[in-house]
Image (cartoon, rainbow, N blue to C red):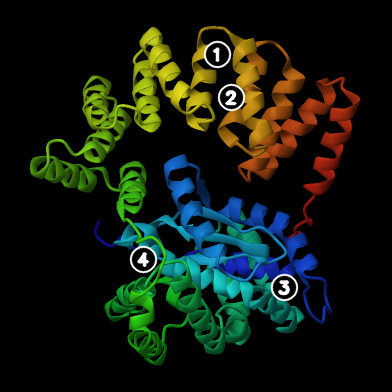
């Protein structure tokens, strides 16, 4: 994939929003205090970014992340890994082990080695307590600067664009080097720690260097195109030289690793899937056509081609490509679910049900398959069956946005408006649309008769209260 355009990311806003939530005058931030920030931090991130919840992409990202976490020193919290839709070359770690990868950076990578290199570096920032240090330092840049940053955050939320950026950047200029960016000492430590544990996890560590060099090369195109990752993670020549030197001096140790060699097939699958879903359709189409000319039996290319055609509405040809993909992988539940989805969208409900039942017999816990089954049952007016499936998905993942949305709509069609507004409120809350969530919860309060749910809604509304923006003079 070609390099995607670089745009100014919102990581500065997220970092400073986190800083603003630290109690004034705090001397330091403990693990317990860091964990308390997570809820508000995630709300802030969801307000600024679109989360990618595709299971192939998310499961792969978490597989790599957890492989690395397993060899790092244990932490008193669980790590979570997310992919957000943003063309910027960036990745960042939030409080208590919440790590975010931008889709643009992932699409610019060429191997799992590169992905692991960046994730390992971010995990090292967390385990070295650099995140808590940055939050603690942000309380010391002065009330005036923090007030300016707060104004920038509010303007950004309101969609003021350039004005918000100007206010934020102007306010933080004095404190930027100590707050926005990791210090060079932090970066060197994260490199040292990350490289050690990358090799323990079976990686060579070369991916960290190649990714940083790839992003570093873009600096020569002008200051407006410097990747955000390099602004928040300084990549000096000395630092790159250190990584190269470390790799050279540890070459024998890396070569003699006893862990299973890393296969790149899972990376290629997730990478192509992300490009198909969110990349430039024309570029992806040319890539897929070239792959199929080279290898007409390329199952992954047929699968991705089917997804691309389904998006454009050419469902008959999409189904043909999914069937060709199944010729090489007859029991792949992901392909079966996509084929069932095409049949469903094309009004071929019986074929959709038959195909989906086959997929769920292979992978009964497959969330996409269960969600699609709920949609099909709802379309057939089998709303009780649909609700049972959706409830089971929400028990498994209380913030499954698509399940929450469909559940709210299904209850609405049953005439149970209190529950409809309740679940739509949960959907908007999980999706970071706080104003819409508040509106739906207030509507639910007027209609719902369940005292337990009333208490829950009141607690949620209390939790969602925001500081009031000062009136303009």
N-terminal label among 2 and 3: 3
N-terminal label among 3 and 1: 3
Disc nearest the viewer among 4 and 3: 4
- State how far apart marks 3 and 1 are (Cα): 49 Å
Callout 1: few (<14), some (14-19), or many (20+) C-alpha neighbours within 10 Å?
many
Q: Which image quadrant is residue 257 in?
A: bottom left
Q: Is residue 473 visible?
A: no
In the image, residue 306 above or below residue 35: above
Residue 69 x %, y %? 56, 63
Is label 2 in a helix, a strand or a loop? helix
Q: Which mark is residue 147?
A: 3
Q: Is residue 356 visible?
A: yes
Callout 3: few (<14), some (14-19), or many (20+) C-alpha neighbours within 10 Å?
some
Disc nearest the viewer among 4 and 2: 4
- State how far apart marks 4 and 3 are (Cα): 42 Å
Q: Tell me the quarter of the image containing the N terminus.
A: bottom left
- State how far apart marks 4 and 2 are (Cα): 38 Å
> For the image shown, how many numbered marks are present on the structure?
4
N-terminal label among 4 and 1: 4
- Label 1 near label 2: C-beta < 8 Å? yes
In the image, residue 180 above or below residue 52: below
Q: Which mark is residue 113?
A: 4
Disc nearest the viewer among 3 and 1: 1
Name the residue nearer the viewer: 318 or 416. 318
Q: Residue at x 21, y 23 (%)?
A: 320
- State how far apart marks 4 and 1 are (Cα): 43 Å
N-terminal label among 4 and 2: 4
Q: Which image quadrant is residue 206 in?
A: bottom left
- State the residue position of label 1: 378
């Amino acid at each position: 994939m070609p390099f995607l355009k670089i745009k100014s990311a919102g990581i500065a806003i997220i970092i400073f929003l986190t800083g603003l939530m630290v109690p004034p005058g705090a001397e330091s931030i403990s693990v317990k205090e860091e964990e308390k920030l997570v809820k508000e931090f995630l709300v802030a991130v969801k307000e600024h970014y679109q989360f990618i919840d595709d299971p192939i992409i998310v499961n792969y990202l978490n597989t790599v992340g957890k492989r690395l976490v397993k060899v790092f020193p244990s932490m008193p919290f669980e790590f979570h890994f997310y992919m957000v839709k943003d063309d910027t070359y960036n990745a960042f770690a939030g409080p208590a082990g919440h790590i975010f990868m931008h889709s643009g950076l992932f699409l610019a990578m060429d191997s799992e080695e590169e992905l692991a290199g960046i994730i390992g570096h971010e995990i090292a920032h967390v385990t070295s307590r650099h995140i808590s240090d940055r939050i603690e330092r942000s309380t010391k840049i002065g009330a005036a600067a923090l007030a300016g940053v707060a104004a920038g955050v509010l303007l950004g939320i309101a969609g003021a664009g350039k004005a918000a950026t100007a206010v934020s950047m102007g306010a933080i200029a004095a404190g930027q080097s100590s707050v926005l960016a990791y210090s060079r000492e932090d970066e060197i430590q994260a490199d040292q720690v990350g490289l050690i544990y990358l090799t323990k996890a079976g990686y060579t560590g070369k991916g960290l260097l190649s990714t940083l060099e790839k992003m570093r090369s873009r600096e020569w195109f002008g200051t407006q195109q410097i990747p955000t990752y390099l602004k928040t993670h300084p990549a000096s020549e000395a630092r790159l030289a250190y990584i190269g030197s470390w790799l050279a001096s540890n070459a024998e140790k890396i070569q003699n690793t006893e862990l299973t060699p890393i296969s790149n097939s899972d990376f290629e699958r997730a990478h192509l899937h992300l490009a198909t879903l969110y990349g430039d359709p024309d570029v992806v189409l040319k890539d897929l056509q070239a792959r199929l000319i080279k290898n007409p039996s390329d199952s992954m290319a047929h699968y991705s081609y089917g997804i691309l055609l389904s998006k454009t509405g050419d469902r008959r040809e999409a189904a043909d490509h999914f069937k060709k993909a199944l010729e090489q992988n007859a029991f792949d539940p992901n392909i079966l679910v996509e084929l069932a989805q095409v049949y469903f969208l094309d009004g071929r409900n019986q074929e959709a049900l038959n195909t989906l039942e086959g997929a769920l017999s292979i992978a009964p816990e497959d969330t996409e398959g269960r969600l699609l089954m709920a949609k099909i049952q709802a379309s057939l007016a089998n709303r009780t069956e649909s609700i049972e499936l959706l409830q089971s998905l929400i028990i498994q993942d209380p913030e499954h946005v698509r399940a929450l949305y469909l559940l709210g709509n299904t209850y609405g069609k049953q005439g149970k408006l209190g529950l409809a507004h309740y679940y739509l409120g949960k959907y908007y809350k999980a999706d970071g649309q706080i104003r819409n969530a508040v509106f739906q919860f207030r509507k639910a309060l007027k209609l719902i008769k369940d005292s337990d749910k009333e208490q829950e809604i009141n607690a949620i509304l209390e939790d969602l209260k925001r500081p009031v923006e000062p009136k303009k003079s």
